Image (cartoon, rainbow, N blue to C red):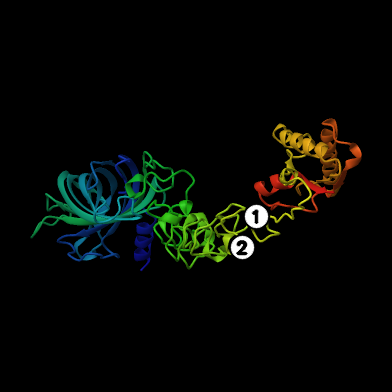
């Protein structure tokens, strides 16, 4: 039993050439140790651990031919013998050299070339040098060299890219039948059970640097820094076919069109960006339906079946007076909000010149934050001055206004200065100063919609009231 334990220990702790080379690791060196298991006329039983086991050690070199085969050269030193008191037994010093051709199962088809477990079979030829001695006299009685034919099988286990363990068994058949001192039926033979460690020179290529060698990398062009699986491909946590590093929703399966995010309504807008994730709609309305195609989502459109404008909340404004048609009593004639979209009604006083009344309807409008009279309004004021000079009983009230973009402290003086500028101009044209009064309202009396550019322009004005 003690010899059996020693044999098992030698087998596990032994060293032999590692068959773990790849196309990028052509050459390897190794050391091995093991036990020799004799079988011959003295004892025809294999695994006779108490009588036929002897120690053995050596070194190996191997060259990788291709994915399927490598060539190994092995030199070993040990002994062979058998303890058999009735026949005297025998012992021989054994020096053996073998050239082996190995077939690898880790060839890229049966197993991955860089697999951790790598089985193989082999065959080869070599020589075996013996120095025999008897157990009784301990004298060498026979010396010689035999041709050694060998077959075997084994496997290797990778520890790192360059280092691994190997275990194999080799059957050797000699060209002589005299190594045990007896020649009867068949030539002497023995098995060598060995284990070893090897160093493979070179480094397996890993073009993309992801830790998976090119031989086993199904995605050899993975960008630097991207986490990969055992096959060298980028991780895809949600299994939607979009790698995590390109997936904006890596933990929820989605669509390629939405960069890996779900799109329930299939409108090409990811649910996370879709204001209506269960109703298909265009990107212009953030994924919500827009029945009339006016760019206003149905949910916000007060006229969802009639094309309108965003300013009018999806409703049309035919006359452009900032009053939507559905609220405009005069949809084809521009008006004001105060008149529900209809023009202002002016009460005509028969005793006042109609021309003057008509001139008074034209507001004097100003540029933003200014009170300088614009040239195109001066002609109107010139005509107004002529009419007032022609009828000395007529009086004029000038009302200044501003849009709502300034505060009260700014808009009130601004509207006052606008009224004063109009009065000053009329006085310069010959109208008596006491016939003109002014008032100002800042932005408190808008005429147009201050939320629109057009409405603001309308509100920067001076209005006229003619009395007698």
- Residue 19 visible in rendering: yes
Number of marks in the rendered image: 2
The answer to whether residue 220 is above or below residue 375 is below
- Residue 251 visible in rendering: no
Relative image position of residue 7 (x, y in whole percent): 34, 61
Mark 1, secondary structure of its residue: loop
Relative image position of residue 124 (x, y in whole percent): 17, 47
Q: Nearer the viewer, residue 367 or 101?
A: 367
Q: Nearer the viewer, residue 44 or 302?
A: 302
The answer to whether residue 442 is above or below residue 434 is below
Kindly indicate whether the residue at mark 1 contacts the one at mark 2 (C-beta within 8 angstroms): yes
Residue beneath disc 2: 329
Relative image position of residue 388 (x, y in whole percent): 81, 39
Residue positioned most to the right = 434
Residue positioned most to the left = 185
Mark 2, secondary structure of its residue: loop
- Point out the image quarter for the N terminus: bottom left
- Image position of 368 (left or right of 265): right
- Image position of 330 (left or right of 101): right
Q: In the rendering, which numbered label is found on residue 335? A: 1
Mark 1 burial class by Cα count in 10 Å: few <14, some 14-19, many 20+:
many
The structure residue drawn at horizontal position 17% and vertical position 62%, both measured from the top left corner, is 42
- Quarter of the image where one finds residue 426: top right
The structure residue drawn at horizontal position 26% and vertical position 44%, both measured from the top left corner, is 74
Relative image position of residue 324 (x, y in whole percent): 59, 59
- Quarter of the image where one finds residue 26: top left
Q: Earlier in the sequence, mark 2 or mark 1?
A: 2
- Image position of 14 (left or right of 376): left
């Amino acid at each position: 039993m003690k010899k059996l334990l020693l044999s098992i220990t030698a087998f596990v702790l032994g060293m032999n050439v590692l068959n773990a080379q790849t196309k990028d690791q052509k050459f390897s060196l190794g050391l091995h140790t093991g036990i020799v298991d004799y079988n011959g006329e003295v004892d025809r039983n294999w695994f006779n651990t108490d009588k036929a086991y002897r120690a053995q050690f050596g070194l190996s070199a191997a060259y990788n031919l291709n994915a399927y085969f490598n060539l190994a050269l092995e030199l070993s030193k040990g002994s062979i013998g058998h303890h058999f008191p009735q026949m005297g037994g025998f012992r021989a010093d054994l020096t053996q050299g073998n050239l082996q051709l190995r077939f690898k199962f880790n060839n890229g088809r049966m197993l991955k070339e860089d697999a951790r477990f790598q089985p193989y079979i082999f065959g080869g030829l070599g020589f075996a040098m013996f120095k025999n001695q008897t157990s009784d006299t301990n004298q060498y009685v026979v010396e010689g060299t035999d041709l050694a034919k060998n077959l075997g099988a084994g496997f290797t286990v990778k520890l790192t890219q360059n280092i691994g363990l190997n275990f194999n068994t080799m059957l050797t058949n000699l060209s002589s039948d005299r190594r045990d001192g007896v020649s009867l039926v068949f030539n002497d033979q023995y098995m060598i059970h060995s284990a070893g460690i090897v160093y493979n020179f070179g480094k397996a290529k890993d073009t993309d640097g992801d830790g998976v060698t090119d031989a086993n990398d199904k995605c050899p062009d993975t960008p630097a820094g991207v986490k990969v699986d055992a096959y060298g491909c980028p991780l895809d946590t949600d299994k939607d076919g979009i790698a995590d590093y390109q997936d904006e929703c890596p933990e929820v399966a989605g669509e390629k069109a939405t960069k890996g995010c779900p799109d329930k309504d299939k409108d090409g807008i990811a649910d996370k960006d879709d204001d209506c994730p269960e109703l298909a709609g265009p990107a212009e309305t953030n994924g919500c339906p827009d029945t009339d195609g006016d760019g206003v989502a149905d949910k916000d459109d007060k006229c969802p079946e009639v094309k309108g404008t965003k300013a009018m909340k999806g409703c049309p404004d035919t006359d452009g007076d900032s009053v939507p048609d559905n609220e405009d009593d005069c949809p084809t004639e521009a008006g004001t909000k105060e008149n529900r979209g209809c023009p202002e009604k002016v009460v005509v006083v028969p005793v006042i010149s109609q021309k003057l009344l008509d001139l008074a309807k034209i507001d004097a409008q100003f540029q933003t934050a200014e009170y300088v009279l614009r040239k195109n309004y001066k002609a109107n004021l010139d005509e107004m001055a002529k009419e007032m000079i022609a009828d000395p009983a007529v009086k004029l009230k000038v009302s200044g206004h501003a849009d709502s973009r300034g505060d009260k402290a700014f808009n009130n003086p601004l509207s006052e200065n606008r009224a004063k500028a109009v009065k000053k101009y009329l006085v310069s044209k010959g109208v008596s100063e006491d016939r003109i009064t002014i008032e100002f309202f800042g932005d408190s009396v808008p005429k147009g919609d201050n939320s629109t550019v057009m409405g603001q322009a309308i509100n920067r004005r001076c209005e006229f009231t003619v009395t007698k």
